[in-house]
Amino acid sequence: MRIDDIILKIIFDSRGQETLKATMKSGNIEVHSSVPQGKSKGEKEVHVLEPHSAIRKFEMIKDQIIEIEFFDLKEFDNYLLRLDGTENKSNLGGNLILVLSQAFCCLVARSKSLELWQYLERQLFVSKEKKAPYFLFNLINGGKHAIYGPKIQEYMIVPQVDDPKVSLEVAQIFFAGLKEYFQKEYGENKFGDEGGLLIPEDNYEKPLKILNQIKKELNLGGKIKFSLDIAASSFYNKEKQVYLLEKNKSFSREKIRQIYKEFISQYDIFSLEDPFEEKDWESFQKLTSEVGDKAIIIGDDLTVTNPKLVKKAIEMKAITGVIIKPTQIGTISETLKTIDLANKYNLKVVISHRSAETNDHFISDLAWASRAWGLKAGAPQPEERMVKYNRIIEIFIK
């Protein structure tokens, strides 16, 4: 594959902030790809360059890239990694490397007359039969994704259906009922970074009670389960080694583990993501041993799509599920390596968006190709979220 031209420009993401979009050309083929950005980040995620700096870096390496014929995606990614020369991609930036990696992936797929997911599937060791991922809809936003509200970052519903179109329809019905409740209870509907509602209360359990009430009112009994992205690192006090889960209240890791166990026994909790701060491997391990058969314990900040950290989590039996975000590791090749590792050891793979998104649906093709257990893309409302869900439905129908 020889690249004839690459055009890199700045676009605005769903938060109105600048991010990168690449257009890559070869012969009469032209593809586009863009990268999102996260507000809640793990410490070991790759370095992100300010977009204008990324463009300046790109102009320095562009001629080198288009002079070479690349055999495949791995060779292209490895070339970028050699140009970068750092462990955390601090020279070229993980965002610049990723937007080029994604675009090259799209270019090769088109050159082979393949759908993007078909090309990605061929790069993976997948043996599971094709099945649509569960959709994890973030309907109430908290933590860093909200200007006020509880410290827990995401209160999600997960429709228990196999058909992604039906899953989206169930979520839209549920969300309509939830918005009606919020309008009556709080007099207005305000929304967070991922399109979910904002609740003007600091009580971490109240959103679960509301979701449970809506589920009963809509007679959705066995059709809905709940998932939480705790994002515990965001409210952990390192000096005092306590969790500031509520205003003026601190919780030990033992106390907060007990709270999670109560949640699992009282509510239909499907999964818990990042229940402890990202260095507390022992607490992850304990919770997984205690309730791992009742709810999926998912690592995100803990593992940051890094195969070395995922391997450690597997060896420690610290998690039963893992979040995959290409932005955390910086190339599609490395992302695929991490997915293969997770699949090999039967971790539930959840492909995830970021809080500031674009209209790119790359992660949806990745979710389908990898036989992911779940796809997180936010609330069933904003355009940049809906494009992800609709892409899965489009592939499923075909």
Image (cartoon, rainbow, N blue to C red):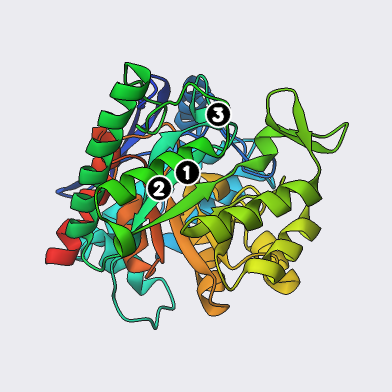
Q: Horizontal and vertical percent for residue 207?
A: 47, 37
Residue at mark 1 to residue at mark 3: CA–CA distance: 18 Å
Residue at 69 percent across and 33 percent down: it is 235
Disc number for residue 327: none
Classify mark 2: helix, strand or loop: helix
Q: Which residue is mark 3?
A: 144
Q: CA distance from mark 2 to mark 1?
A: 6 Å
> Within 10 Å of the Cα at label 3, are there few (<14), some (14-19), or many (20+) other Cα atoms?
many
- In-front residue for pair 57/302: 302
Query: Residue type at mark 1?
Result: Leu
Residue at image x 37%, y 41%?
378
Q: Nearer the viewer, residue 108 or 222?
A: 222
- The location of residue 163, given as percent across then percent down, is 21, 65
**Looking at the rendering, in which quadrant would you find the N terminus?**
bottom left
Say whether marks 3 and 2 touch (CB < 8 Å): no
- The circle drawn on residue 208 is 1
Q: Is residue 228 left or right of residue 251?
A: left
Is label 1 or label 3 in front? 1
Is the Cβ of the residue at disc 2 closer than 8 Å to that at disc 1?
Answer: yes
The amino acid at mark 3 is: Lys
Residue plotted at (46% across, 59% down): 268
Vertically, is 301 above or below 74? above
- Kindly identify the amino acid type of the residue bearing the numbered disc 2: Asn
- Answer with the quarter of the image where residue 23 lies: top left
Residue 162 vs residue 203, the one in the foreground:
203
Q: Quadrant of the C terminus?
A: bottom left
Helix, strand or loop status at disc 3: helix
The first of marks 3 and 2 along the sequence is 3
